[in-house]
Every structure is written in structure tokens, then in C-alpha cells.
Image (tube, coloured by chain):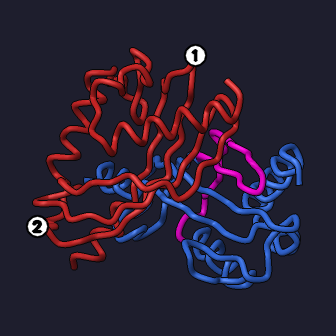
Chain colours: A blue, B red
């Protein structure tokens, strides 16, 4: 996959997430997709996202930067949202918080096969203190 | 700067960090370099690194992945080290911990001008519990 195709695939992926389109998403994920070195598979990956949307009803993935270098793509994602209860161990309880995520994806055969994500969880702790 | 030059610049940067070479490093940093949206400048950036090495005497930056897409470079860095006291608010006290950092750099005119870093601090909390 060339760089432009990678970027388009990634934008489709983020669009699926924001639309909570769990029917189109499987076509973008490898059967054995890993999240932070754990094999979660397509079903586990979607369940993880569904739990995220339950915890954060107004969750929206905003792309700040895309860095594409086949077979990898890195992104900086920005979030501004109001988690309803406890998020990452912090009692947010509906307050609005902002935080970022730097995430690296490996693409194989047109599908995301590996996701290495670091979310700035401490930013949330600081905001609700 | 083309992609290969960017990768070479980044490898020189990491080499400087691991050697604690504070004389060569300024040539790789923009005068107004920012770290997580704060203008720290060359002097402030080096002071930040020196504090890191005081807190973590065996600190070593290990590159897991480089994703280069001029003018950006993203990296996944892996750490296995023994911070001497409190790190990121956690009393590590010399225990060995492993954690990762996903970081995105913007390069301008052959120098790093913007650093957006997310360190997996919660991984440390889990390991010392």
C-alpha cells in the first residue's frame, strides 16, 4: 500500500469510529489485530470501542496529525469530551476533559494488524483534581 | 529534508541523548523548540533531559519504531530502567520498570522545533503497586 492509500484507509477507519459503524469497521481490521501487544481480534477490538463509547457518550476522534510511512501510520489524536463516570481510574463524572493520544498502527494487506497506543491519562487526573 | 535525512537526524538526536552529549545536541534543536506545546527553548530542553537523567541514572532511549514523513517523524521508544526516587509522582525507589513513549517531532530547517510526547506513566503505577 502506498502512502496516500494508507492515509485514506486511516481516515476511513476514524470515520467508522466516529459514526460507531461496527459493520464497516471489520473490513479495516486484521483478524488477529493486537492492541498494545495483546491479541484482541476484530470482535474484541469492537467491544473495546463500544465500551469507550459507553464511558464517553460524546467521544469523538479528532485527528491532529497523520504521519504515514508504509507499512506504518502514526497519529496524534485530540479528545474533548465528558466521560459519564470513572475513566482510566479517575472519577470524571460528566466534567469536560481534554487529552491526547499518540498512536502507531501497522498495516498489513490493507488492514490494521497492530495498534500501539499511549493515551495521556495523567492529563485527566490533573484536570479533575 | 528528505525522509532518509530526517531518520539520520533523529538517530543522531537519540545518540546525543544516550551519550548525554549536551554540546552536540543544540545543533539539532530549534531555538524555540516546544515540548507538549510549551516553548522550552534549547536551554530548557537540555535542563529537562538533565533532570530526567538525575531521576533515572540508567536512562536509555531505545527506538522501537521510526515513522518518517517529512516534516514529521514519529517514534515509539521503549524504556527499561531503575528510577532512583519518585518518577511521575510514583515512588519507584530504584525498582526496575518498563514503559513506552509515543512521540511526534516536527523538523524545520534541519532542527527539531516541536515535540509532542505521550509517556505511558500508568504502566509504572501498575508495576510498583
User: Where does the C terminus of chain B fall, quadrant-wise?
Assistant: bottom left
Pointer 1 local density, CA inside 10 Å: few below 14, some 14–19, many at least 20: few
As drawn, the label of residue A86 is none
Tell me the residue at 16%/51% (across/down). B55
| Horizontal side of residue A45 vs A111, given as left or right | left
Task: Name which of mark 1 and mark 2 comes first in the sequence.
Answer: 2
Residue B122 % position (x, y)? 34, 66
Secondary element at tag 1 = loop
The verdict on residue A64 being magenta is: yes
Please give the chain letter of the residue carrying mark 2: B
What is the count of numbered marks?
2
Residue A20 % position (x, y)? 75, 66
Residues drawn in magenta: A55-76
User: Where does the N terminus of chain B fall, quadrant-wise?
Assistant: top right
Q: In which quarter of the view is residue B80 placed?
A: bottom left
Tell me the residue at 43%/54% (across/down). A120
Please give the chain letter of the residue carrying mark 1: B
Q: Which residue is mark 2?
A: B93
Residue A88 shows in the view: yes
| Horizontal side of residue B100 vs A22, given as left or right | left
Q: Which residue is mark 1?
A: B109
Tell me the residue at 35%/71% (across/down). A89
Residue A90 % position (x, y)? 34, 66
Amino acid at each position: 500500500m502506498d502512502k496516500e492509500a494508507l492515509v485514506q484507509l486511516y481516515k476511513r477507519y476514524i470515520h467508522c469510529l466516529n459514526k460507531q459503524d461496527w459493520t464497516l469497521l471489520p473490513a479495516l481490521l486484521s483478524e488477529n489485530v493486537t492492541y498494545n501487544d495483546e491479541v484482541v481480534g476484530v470482535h474484541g477490538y469492537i467491544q473495546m470501542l463500544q465500551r469507550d463509547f459507553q464511558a464517553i457518550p460524546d467521544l469523538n476522534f479528532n485527528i491532529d496529525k497523520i504521519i504515514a510511512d508504509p507499512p506504518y501510520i502514526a497519529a496524534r489524536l485530540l479528545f474533548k469530551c465528558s466521560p459519564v463516570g470513572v475513566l482510566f481510574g479517575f472519577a470524571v463524572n460528566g466534567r469536560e476533559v481534554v487529552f491526547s493520544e499518540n498512536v502507531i498502527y501497522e498495516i498489513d494487506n490493507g488492514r490494521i494488524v497492530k495498534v500501539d497506543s499511549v493515551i495521556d491519562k495523567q492529563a485527566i487526573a490533573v484536570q479533575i483534581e
